[in-house]
Amino acid sequence: METTLQLYSVTPHPQVEYWSVCKVEALFETPFLELIHRAALVHRENFNPQAIQLSTLMSIKTGGCPEDCGYCPQSARYHTGVQKQALLNVEEIVEKAKIAKSRGANRFCMGAAWRGPKPKDIAKMTEIIKAVKELGLETCGTFGLLEDGMAEDLKEAGLDYYNHNIDTAPEHYKKVIGTRDFDDRLSTLGKVRKAGLKVCCGGIIGMNENRKERAGFIASLANLDPQPESVPINQLVKVEGTPLADAEALDWTEFVRTIAVARITMPKSYVRLSAGRQGMSEEMQAMCFMAGANSIFYGDKLLVTGNSEEDSDQILMAKLDLEPETAENRYVPEPSQR
């Protein structure tokens, strides 16, 4: 039985196609090269295929999270070697943001490990957001579950995007996380949209889900109304000490298929090749870009796990004739094509 999705907007958008789980699963079943070709065509209709949006992610409050997410080394419930760290001060964060901008990033993403911020935390977050925004960077925050009014405060401070991943399919959710519900994620996404923030929302592939559940995950994202502006697709980074450290290995073609299906179902969203790139070959990453990925996290570290080194990214982008996205090379379709 298919799960009925709760959309976080009550305003209908006739341009958004409804994607049933069966329909998305049929896309997954498309012959591999045909699927990549179809996704590449959709990508070219909506974006410059040579431009890659570069984001940098920084953990501004690390470890000690009370939640039990089975993939996360920052949970206080697991012994992973991650040291608890208080919220960094504004000066430290701004210095890192300056470095990110100098290296080509145009979006600076900040993450805090907690279930959700308290009102006193929001006061600090708004100060940080204002300081980073003054550098001329787009700002993105992943701060957990939000209470009423918090999203509006973040928006007023200058936050552009709010990241809040649904993580996986609704029917697989309780196998990964027990301290919150799938609907809790949708509730915060609704608050974010109501405040006028852009949404960054995706999840993780390779958490022992089957293909039908991967299809349910993509359908859940594609049926959000409106669709997320940014969709990070992560490959599970197995961390010793977490419940998913021994998850079954995912074949690389299945991950590329997921990127392609995300591109076809969410044609105007940025599809970000996120965690797990450090373990991907150049050839696999190239296939992901061909399949419609057009954003990456740029830098040698994500929140607490490793990422591809910047030099490696520059070399790969040069080999593939890719360039950082700018206002000048960003493709905007003609009105008749929208």
Image (spheres, rainbow, N blue to C red):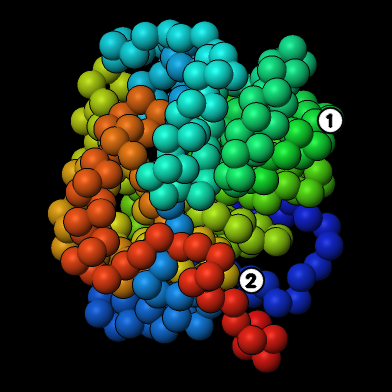
Task: Between residue 129 and residue 115, name the one nearer to us.
Answer: 129
Q: Is residue 178 visible?
A: no
Asked if residue 183 lies left or right of residue 303, the reply is right
Q: Residue at x 68, y 51 (%)?
A: 198
Position in image of residue 202 (x %, y %): 50, 49
Question: How far separated are the C-alphas under marks 1 and 2?
Answer: 30 Å
Q: Position of residue 317 (x, y in %)?
A: 26, 61
The C terminus appears in which quarter of the rendering?
A: bottom right
Q: Is residue 273 left or right of residue 266?
A: left
Q: Where's the N terminus, which quadrant?
A: bottom right
Q: Residues within 10 Å of mark 2 (few under 14, many from 20)?
A: some
- Callout 1 amino acid: Gly
Identify the image quadrant of residue 212: bottom left
Circle 1 sits on which residue?
149
Q: In the image, residue 283 lies at what x, y percent?
A: 16, 63
State the residue position of label 2: 18
Q: Residue at x 64, y 86 (%)?
A: 334
